[in-house]
Image: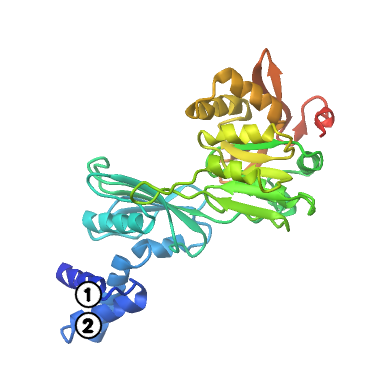
Amino acid sequence: MTEELVERVRRRLAASGAPADPVSVARAVRAEAGGALGQEAVLGAVRLARDEFVGAGPLAPLLGRPGVTDVLVTSPDEVWIDAGTGPEKTEVRFVDEESVRRLAQRLALAGGRRLDDAQPFADCWLPGVGPRGRIRMHAVLPPLAPAGTALSLRVLRPATHDLAELRLRGVFGTSGAELLDSVIRRRLTFLVSGGTGTGKTTLLSALLGAVPPGERIVCVEDAGELRPDHPQFVSLIARPANVEGAGEIGLGELVRQALRMRPDRLVVGEVRGGEVIALLNAMNTGHDGGACTVHANSSAEVPARMEALAALGGLKRDALHSQLTAAVRVVLHMCRSPSGIRRLEEVGVVRSFRGEAKVVPVWSKGHWIGDETPFEEMAA
């Protein structure tokens, strides 16, 4: 499969206007190869062309493996995967740097992004690439990435486990199950904190599945990860800007729209920026039992993290702490051990100390700290 043949196939597909699906690619290869290649050579050329033009190319089999959450390309001869136990090098290789660059550019275009020398990095969601979930792509071109095009693909699978299954998996024990039941039953507004890959979204989805079926949940997300087993679950998905930079609808706007949809519980999949202001405003307007996830290293660091996010939207520090203590009752902190085990590490309640929000631990590693009924005074 020479570069010349690849280019001829590319021109034929472009001229025909046919989609770059496996059938169209195979036809174009056979037409361009003519009688110059034998049957086995044609089949080999078709496989290479499919890698060049269809889906995630040579990375597609890796994305399809059960348990794989990340596929990482650091150079043409270094492709890694993470299946929950840390990065593992694979046998997949690219021909050269240019082939990695072409794949990254094609994926960026499919996600509505530009990736070239003038715009040497891109971040987007990929439509119809992953067989097991949505794919988020990030790419950086040289010279910003001196070792070659750095390509990262993350598989976001729908979070569908319920609380019973999480308990069986060891995420929490008996006291943790009782605690989580109390949070839902008392309609306490809560945050789920933790680092990347600790199971924040999985726990949130399971908790939403435990909400009484008569309550209407309106959920706002960047990606449709939350799939709780609940009859009154309504999902709103943010829309990124197109190639021209227009058409974006962010989480903040969707939170405002969600308030008009008669929610009994308002949920944001994850707060990452100024939308935290709209969320806290909503939680302070009588919408008890709401929830969201946030990246934080510990439950004690949640107020500082929320403060930093609110600053992106122009909310002052004292206003943020006042809003946070009035809106949020409980913080559930998730962690992931070096062996890949995810668990509910700590639970804290939000208190105000001299006008500043603090998270006070009340439960840690399966055991209550002091009073075993800290939620009584918080009941709605």
- Left or right: 240, with 192 as reference point: left
Q: Name the kind of residue labelled 2 in the image.
A: Ala
- For disc 2, the marked residue is 31
Q: Foreground mark, 2 or 1?
A: 1
Work out whether residue 84 or residue 22 is closer to the camera in this orientation and state it.
22
Coloration mode: rainbow
Residues under numbered marks 2 and 1 in contact, where contact means CB atoms less than 8 Å apart:
yes
In the image, 151 versus 368, the foreground residue is 151
Could you tell me residue 301's position as x and y percent?
Answer: 58, 26
> Looking at this view, is 191 or 76 the one in front?
191
Residue 100 image point, x, y percent: 28, 56
- Residue at (44% x, 47% y) in the render: 248
Badge 2 element: helix
Q: Secondary structure at mark 1?
A: helix
Q: Give me the disc on residue 12.
A: 1
On screen, 112 above or below 292? below
Question: Is disc 2 surrounded by few (<14), some (14 to 19) or many (20+) residues within 10 Å?
Answer: few
Q: List x then y, in percent, for residue 18.
A: 31, 75
Residue 227, picture quadrant: bottom right
